[in-house]
Image (spheres, rainbow, N blue to C red):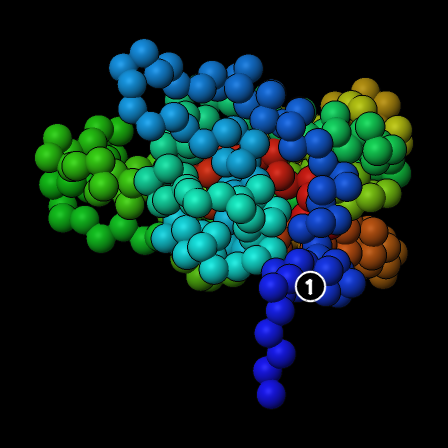
């Protein structure tokens, strides 16, 4: 027989806490009110001079988009889960609300961030929150790049030609614009084609937290953005990266700044690596590989171009 209780909701929340709700762990490490204030400073809330329904508080929108990125949800799926899922409602601060943000609200909030170019400011605010809790960048820097797939475009030739010229077809309605990605590009990796973006990321060796990011189109080579994601705040001078970043001139330049550069070596045509070089590559891989493999797979699930908020939530992937 099923037992009914007037306090069933509270009892479920208590059980969630005992099971270890990861979203409640995030509450302990991130001051979402401070992040919301940083967003409002960088991307002010829209004026209500013309009336209309007031926008949801920025902090609630930050929390909902964090859920979207952590669980790889579309706008439609996010709206459904906020209506259905107890842990989502509790984390977003909507447990007792009669109103839930809808798919259009999510898109509008992301556009607000995109137009204001607020991602860098927000990312820095997130790192300040981590520093407050003692998560300073330590142990060296680990740099790698990851492809972030975007939905493939199915467009007629005339529309493709316009997009290549960085123009938008005049007859596209707002609903269609939300579904079309005009900036993603194609690239190949291990013989397989990908459409989307590339994220170059710097994670510290101590905590495996992403400290710096650079988002580019997928067709840009990884090595172009190594210096863009260097983190001068790391307490160690060690820098680790795989053989895709080998460049003698740059390596000399980085060493001149005091960095201890640990790059894997790659074999030249007709000249295989020596046993020492292979051993060195293995040692670097043991340090570099496990670190970023903890962060970048989570980052891969985030829609970087569509959701600027992913730029600052990267450090939470561990």
Judge from the rendering whether residue 214 lies leftward or rightward of residue 124; answer left or right.
left
Q: Is residue 118 rendered to the left or right of residue 238?
A: left
- Which of the pair 243/1 is nearer the observer? 1
Residue furthest to the bottom: 1
Which residue is drawn at the image coordinates 72% and 65% (left, top)? Answer: 15
Residue at the image point whose x is 12% and y is 30% from the top: 170
Q: Quadrant of the N terminus?
A: bottom right
Query: Residue 161: where, in percent of width, then height?
Result: 18, 37
| Residue positioned 56% across, 52% down in the render | 88
**Is residue 244 visible in this depiction of the protein?**
no
Residue annotated with mark 1: 11
In the picture, measured across the screen, residue 53 lies left or right of residue 241, that is left
Residue at coordinates 53% horizontally, 19% vertically from top-left? 40
Q: Secondary structure at mark 1?
A: helix
Q: Residue 274: give x, y in percent of width and height.
A: 82, 58
Judge from the rendering whether residue 158 lies leftward or rightward of residue 249; answer left or right. left
């Amino acid at each position: 027989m099923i037992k009914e209780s007037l306090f069933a909701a509270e009892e479920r929340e208590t059980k969630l806490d005992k099971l270890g709700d990861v979203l409640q762990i995030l509450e302990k490490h991130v001051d979402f009110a401070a992040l919301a204030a940083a967003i409002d400073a960088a991307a002010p809330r829209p004026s209500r001079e013309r009336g209309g329904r007031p926008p949801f508080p920025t902090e609630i929108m930050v929390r909902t988009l964090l859920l979207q990125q952590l669980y790889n949800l579309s706008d439609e799926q996010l709206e459904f889960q906020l209506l259905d899922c107890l842990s989502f409602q509790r984390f977003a601060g909507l447990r007792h609300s009669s109103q839930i943000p809808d798919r259009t609200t999510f898109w509008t909030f992301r556009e607000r961030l995109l137009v204001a170019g607020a991602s860098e400011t927000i990312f820095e605010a997130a790192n300040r929150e981590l520093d407050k809790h003692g998560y300073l960048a330590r142990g060296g820097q680990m740099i790698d790049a990851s492809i972030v797939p975007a939905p493939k475009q199915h467009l007629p030739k005339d529309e493709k030609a316009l997009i290549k010229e960085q123009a938008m077809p005049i007859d596209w309605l707002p609903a269609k614009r939300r579904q079309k990605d005009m900036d993603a590009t194609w690239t190949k990796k291990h013989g397989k084609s990908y459409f989307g973006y590339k994220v170059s990321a710097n994670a510290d060796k101590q905590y495996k937290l992403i400290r710096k990011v650079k988002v580019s189109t997928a067709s840009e080579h990884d090595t172009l953005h190594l210096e863009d994601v260097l983190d001068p705040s790391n307490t160690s001078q060690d820098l680790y990266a795989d053989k895709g970043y080998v460049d003698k001139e740059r390596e000399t330049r980085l060493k001149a700044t005091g960095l201890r550069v640990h790059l894997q070596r790659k074999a030249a045509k007709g000249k295989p690596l020596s046993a020492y070089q292979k051993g060195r590559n293995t040692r670097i891989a043991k340090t570099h590989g496990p670190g970023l493999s903890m962060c970048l797979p989570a980052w891969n699930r985030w829609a970087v171009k569509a959701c600027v908020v992913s730029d600052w939530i990267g450090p939470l992937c561990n």
